[in-house]
């Protein structure tokens, strides 16, 4: 199974450790096409060695190749929203993981979408349990 993991890059890397741990867990279900998003070396400057059009085209190709998209959406990100929208447009399965934070709410465009499964978590262990349950019931 091909899995596209989406998480904030240029909008903030505060959750990079969570991304790493989520990606490591996702590997038990298949190949994570965007494993680099868990790297502590990736900063808000993004991949400086690649032009934006290359990153866009490569990542959309990966979304199209993916059987499922898993997005960590606690840090609002235009790019992640775009990826989710494209995945939904192409009838991909989408799981969004959201960690509630005081003074912040998840975008209604994600929370209100019938085509996106959204689950709240408090700890990485909660997120792992959510992923285990999601993938155990996933029908492709």
Image (cartoon, rainbow, N blue to C red):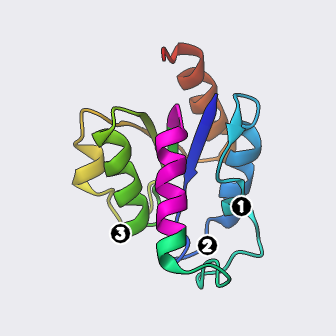
Q: Nearer the viewer, mark 1 or mark 2?
A: 1
Decide: few, some or many residues near mark 3? Use Cα within 10 Å; few <14, some 14-19, many ≥20. few
Q: Secondary structure at mark 1?
A: helix
Q: Quadrant of residue 78?
A: bottom left
Task: Look at mark 2 in the image and give the residue it sits on.
Answer: 14
Residue 36 image label:
1
In the figure, 4 relative to 16: above or below? Answer: above
Residue 100 coordinates in the image, percent (x, y) = 44, 55
In the figure, 32 relative to 34: above or below? Answer: above
Q: Which residues are magenta?
A: 55-68
In the figure, 135 relative to 71: above or below? Answer: above
Q: Quadrant of residue 125?
A: top right
Principal secondary structure, stretch drawn in magenta: helix
Indicate left or right for 121 with 104 as reference.
right
Between 78 and 107, the one nearer to me in the picture: 78
In the figure, 19 relative to 14: above or below? Answer: above
Badge 1 vs badge 2, beta-carbon distance below 8 Å: no
Residue 24 coordinates in the image, percent (x, y) = 77, 44
Residue 34 coordinates in the image, percent (x, y) = 65, 53
Q: Mark 2 or mark 1, which is nearer the start of the sequence? A: 2
Task: Look at mark 3 in the image and give the residue it sits on.
Answer: 103
């Amino acid at each position: 199974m091909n899995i596209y993991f989406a998480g904030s890059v240029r909008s903030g890397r505060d959750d990079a450790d969570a991304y790493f741990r989520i990606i490591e867990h996702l590997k038990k279900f298949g190949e994570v096409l965007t494993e680099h998003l868990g790297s502590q070396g990736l900063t808000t400057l993004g991949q400086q060695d690649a032009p934006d059009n290359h990153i866009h085209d490569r990542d959309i190709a990966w979304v199209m190749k993916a059987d499922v998209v898993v997005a960590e959406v606690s840090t609002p990100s235009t790019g992640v929203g775009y990826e989710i929208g494209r995945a939904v447009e192409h009838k991909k399965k989408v799981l969004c993981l959201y960690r509630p934070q005081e003074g912040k709410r998840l975008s209604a465009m994600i929370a209100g979408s019938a085509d996106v499964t959204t689950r709240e978590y408090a700890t990485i262990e909660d997120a792992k349990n959510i992923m285990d349950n999601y993938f155990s019931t996933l029908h492709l």
